[in-house]
Image (tube, helix red, strand yellow):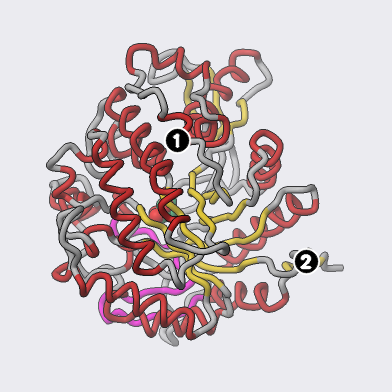
Amino acid sequence: MAERLAFPEGFVWGTATASFQIEGGRDERGTCIWDDFCDWTGKVFQGHNGDIADDHYHRYREDVALMKELGGAAYRFSISWPRVLPEGHGAVNPNGLDFYNRLVDELLENGITPYVTLYHWDLPSALQRMGGWAARDTASRFADYCEVMARALGDRVKDWITHNEPWVVAFIGNLQGRHAPGWEDLGLALQIGHHLLLSHGLAVPILRQHGDADTRVGITLNFSPAYPASDSAEDVAAARRHDGYTNRWFMDPLYKGSYPADLVEAWGAAMPQVSADDLAQIAVPIDFLGVNYYSRAVVKHQPGGLLDYATTKPEGEYTHMEWEVFPKALEDLLLRLSSDYAPQALYITENGCAYPDTLTAEGKVHDPKRIEYLRQHLAASQRAITLGAPLQGYFAWSLMDNFEWGYGYSRRFGLIYVDYETMKRHPKDSFYAYQSIIAENAVEL
Ligand code: FCB
């Protein structure tokens, strides 16, 4: 008999996107570091770029109508900083601000609650020329930009997310060179990570100040739950290093006001400059933690590389990203975050999978693997709730297929298929599966 896993009343259901990945409308905003990165030969799959993307900038009404059809009560999207402030600071682009005003109004008119991310990686190029996130001053520019947004939308937007995945920004963008701006320097990446955290700490009180009692502010981190490849002491220690690098490096300063000592020691001379009050500023209390979870890491000791370990590839189901499908790690993660950090509330702000979808002649997309991924991760989430995790919502990544960073348009994460020739949207089978889960407030296994 089917097992019915019910979610608490009031559980927030939604979908997520990000500005650069869906908006397009390139001529109507300033340049960002992802535009520059797309122009850098060989960095992005087939030179794809965000000039048109899903053309959401012009089609947002149609997209909001689809959200309404889905039945989700919430939508997480991000603001393009250079659309609002083409130079990153100074003069506001009124059309840019107007776009977000119209989007928020459209959402609210359709009964959809906006969850707004302020930085999902599209730093204005003008600020990059002044040092980008390596410059401490950029943290203050970010706080100023947050003030502009809070003043403009704070009467209607109650849920703010300062940053999306600062780990990815710092390390994939500045150590691995696979994301904008594309550098490969550990010291630089660590300094940037610190400035991202600092900018969060500066922005939180500003967002609150321009809101009301209902205003809630959080941050979204990506997590890579680490499992040792064997129970040898060496592999266990290696998994601990991976955990420190990918999870604790940002969680500890945010929730404990300190960087994890084992990693501080490992980084040695590459440690960033940290001013006296920074960590207190960074650890400012927040209302919720956004959790992005896609996969786990199975780690073995291996001398060399950054921290003397390597990740292995266990047998199992893998998505088009080559990420292992492992829902149990989401349950473990939610419980571990709850016990180690006691966040006031948790939201899964991203979870989802890419598979090579095809559109049938009838305009349908049959994506049973995505449905299974969704169901299993929701089941894991529900179990974590019953075991005490303060999980209050789930946002599927993504509402629709979009620009998947270095992979361009070659990876499809959407519940809605986008035909990039015609820009026509086709809800996939997973869209309807999610629609009934939302309607039931439960998942059946
Ligand atoms: C996350 C990003 C998001 C999306 C997913 C697949 O790291 O936050 O924009 O690309 O991965």
Find numbered disc 2 in the image and state the secondary structure of the residue it sits on: strand
Disc assigned to residue 260: none
* 349 lies above or below 113: above
Give the residue type at disc 2: Ala
Q: Residue at x 19, y 53 (%)?
A: 89
Q: Residue at x 29, y 39 (%)?
A: 173
The quarter of the rendered structure image containing the N terminus is bottom right
Q: Mark 1 vs mark 2: which is more N-terminal?
A: 2
Instruction: Tell me if label 1 and label 2 are in contact, CB under 8 Å.
Output: no
Residue 61 visible here: yes
Residue tagged 2: 6
* Quadrant in the rendering for residue 31: bottom left
Give the residue type at disc 1: Gln
Q: Residue at x 59, y 40 (%)?
A: 315
Whole-percent x and y of residue 15?
51, 67
Depth check: 283 or 71 in front?
Answer: 283
In the displayed structure image, the side of residue 21 where residue 348 appears, left or right: right
Disc assigned to residue 281: 1
Whole-percent x and y of residue 14?
55, 68
User: What is the span of residues highlighted in magenta in the rendered image?
Assistant: 408-428
In the displayed structure image, the side of residue 58 where residue 203 appears, left or right: right
The quarter of the rendered structure image containing the C terminus is bottom right
